[in-house]
């Protein structure tokens, strides 16, 4: 059997995990909102029309922050359309996804849903068709207490107390040629800075995320971040990263290595943030908001054939298989490995649209394969991330070299009094004997070993068979074996005050 080792040391800590690393995303796109979180005619709908069955599943994922309302959608959105009496709201052609937006859900409703989901909102402003003034007005509507035009508009709409939204995105993917009114890097640097200034003049307590590149392979990657941060450094707190992964070549061994690309992306953006800090003789770090990440490729063909101007069509409905769950497990480990700088991240998205949760209109909802690594990592992976000192054999593919068979990280979860280890065995052929040296923590007791594996890499969950790919509990055995192509969580109970 192959061997791998991990040394865990109390003195080798990456840093405290910001819980917002387990954020997610709801966009006005496809069935994320309509027949996703909101379906007034559904048997579980509450008095506001929100599906309680979906809220229950969202609650399981323990998502502390949810990005809204887009995505590409936001770059053509008039936020006022989604406020006030529902029967007066306009139906509009929506240009990002070529659908009809009914505006039956807007910020008035979403802020209430987010409270029910126990999540804060990461609100995006439209820097496509609109600019600083409309962003400032939206902020006034959401956060100003009372006695001004937009705060009183909110109060007249029935919301006496401000929504107090603390995190704001300055547009979305403004480098993308697909973006409604996309910008050059110079144009975006200017509008983002000016918008940031007026927003912070109105509410200095907010935090702002500037758009970085839409993915690592954008032709302007690097230059974009540098140009934007050189102008906006004093006014923004985070730069965004977006990246989706897929097994387009049907090469699983290579696909499982895509988290290494995420590592490269994160390291490169950190380098740029620190370069700008140095150039500016600055004292603050610009941190990273990886506010769109996931697997996205299964639905591309179907989406290219979609008829335009439908209401809430089946769009971006990727059906995830078992190997996608392994990839999501690896991507989560990558985010945790950089938790000293990646303070926020959003699994894109949450319901129906490239999502862990799927619904049937008028029917049940169920968990996709990727639900499970996210569920365990979000619920147990809280506390301090420890530096993974791992020795593992490696393999090569055409696109990636030195891919470790074992991807892993350990977390000191102070609240639970446990060390949590997440580990993926990328080998498609062999089990791996995983020796975890926890002597620095007084050899705590292994209390649970959760395994997600499947003989069929392409196995999926469906509404008829929602339990096709689900985790199981392995027998507790101190000789840890990571079965071939598996995701694992190991929980070790600390004895006494060993932290
Ligand atoms: O999440 C789906 C889309 O992916 C978002 O709207 C956009 O920001 C990205 O390209």
Image: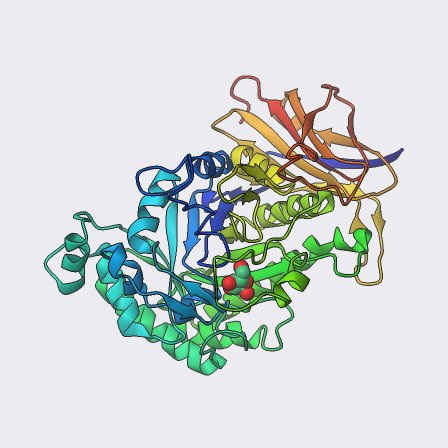
User: Where on the picture, by quarter, is residue 305?
Assistant: bottom right
Left or right: residue 267 compared with residue 341: right
Q: Nearer the viewer, residue 38 or 284?
A: 38
Give percent across and percent down for residue 152. Answer: 14, 58
Total marks in image = 0
Image: 477 above or below 325: above
Q: Nearer the viewer, residue 299 or 407?
A: 299
Q: Which residue lies at the image location 46% right of the left edge and 72% below the top edge?
A: 95
Q: Which residue lies at the image location 80% right of the left edge and 40% below the top edge?
A: 456
Q: Is residue 210 visible?
A: no
Quadrant location of the N terminus in the rendered image: top right
Q: Nearer the viewer, residue 418 or 347?
A: 347
Give percent across and percent down for residue 156. Answer: 14, 54
Q: Is residue 118 visible?
A: yes
Left or right: residue 235 compared with residue 452: left
Image: 333 above or below 88: above
Give percent across and percent down for residue 279. Answer: 47, 73
Q: Which residue lies at the image location 66% right of the left edge and 32% below the top edge?
A: 467
């Amino acid at each position: 059997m192959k061997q791998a080792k991990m040394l865990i040391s109390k003195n080798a800590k990456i840093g405290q995990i910001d819980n917002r690393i387990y954020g997610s995303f709801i966009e006005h796109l496809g069935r994320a909102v309509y027949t996703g979180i909101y379906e007034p005619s559904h048997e579980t709908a509450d008095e506001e029309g929100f599906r309680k069955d979906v809220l229950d599943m969202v609650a399981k994922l323990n998502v502390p922050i949810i990005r809204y309302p887009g995505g590409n959608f936001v770059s053509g959105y008039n936020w006022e359309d989604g406020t006030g009496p529902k029967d007066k709201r306009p139906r509009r052609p929506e240009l990002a996804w070529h659908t009809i937006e009914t505006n039956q859900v807007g910020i008035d409703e979403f802020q209430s849903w987010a409270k029910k989901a126990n999540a804060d909102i990461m609100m995006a402003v439209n820097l496509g068709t609109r600019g600083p003034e409309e962003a400032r007005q939206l902020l006034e509507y959401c956060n100003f207490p009372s006695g001004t035009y937009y705060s009183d508009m909110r109060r007249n709409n029935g919301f006496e107390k401000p929504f107090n939204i603390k995190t704001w995105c300055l547009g979305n993917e403004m480098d993308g040629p697909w973006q409604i009114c996309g910008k050059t890097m110079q144009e975006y640097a200017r509008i983002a800075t000016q918008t940031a200034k007026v927003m912070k003049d109105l509410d200095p307590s907010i935090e702002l995320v500037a758009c970085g590149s839409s993915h690592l392979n954008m032709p302007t990657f690097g230059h974009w971040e540098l140009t934007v941060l050189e102008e906006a450094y004093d006014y923004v707190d985070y730069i965004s990263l977006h990246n989706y992964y897929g097994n387009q070549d049907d090469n699983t061994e290579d696909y499982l290595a895509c988290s290494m690309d995420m590592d490269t992306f994160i390291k490169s953006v950190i380098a740029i943030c620190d370069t700008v800090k140095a150039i500016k003789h600055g004292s603050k770090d610009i941190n990273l908001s990886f506010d769109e990440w996931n697997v996205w490729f299964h639905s591309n063909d179907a989406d290219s054939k979609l008829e335009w101007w439908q209401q809430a069509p089946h769009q971006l409905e990727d059906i995830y298989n078992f190997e996608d769950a392994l990839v999501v497990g690896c991507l989560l480990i990558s985010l945790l490995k950089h938790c000293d700088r990646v303070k926020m991240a959003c699994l894109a998205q949450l319901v129906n649209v490239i999502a862990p949760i799927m619904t049937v209109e008028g029917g049940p909802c169920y968990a996709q394969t990727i639900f499970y690594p996210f569920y365990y990592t979000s619920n147990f992976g809280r506390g301090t991330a420890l530096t993974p000192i791992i020795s593992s054999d490696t393999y090569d593919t055409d696109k990636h070299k030195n891919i470790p068979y074992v991807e892993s990280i350990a977390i000191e979860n102070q609240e639970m009094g446990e060390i949590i280890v997440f580990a993926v065995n990328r080998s498609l052929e062999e089990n791996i004997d995983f020796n975890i040296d926890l002597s620095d923590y007084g050899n705590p007791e292994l209390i649970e070993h959760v395994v997600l594996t499947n003989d069929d890499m392409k196995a999926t969950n469906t509404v008829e068979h929602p339990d096709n790919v689900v985790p199981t509990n392995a027998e507790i055995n101190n000789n840890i074996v990571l079965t071939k192509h598996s995701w694992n969580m190991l929980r070790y109970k600390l004895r006494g005050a060993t932290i």
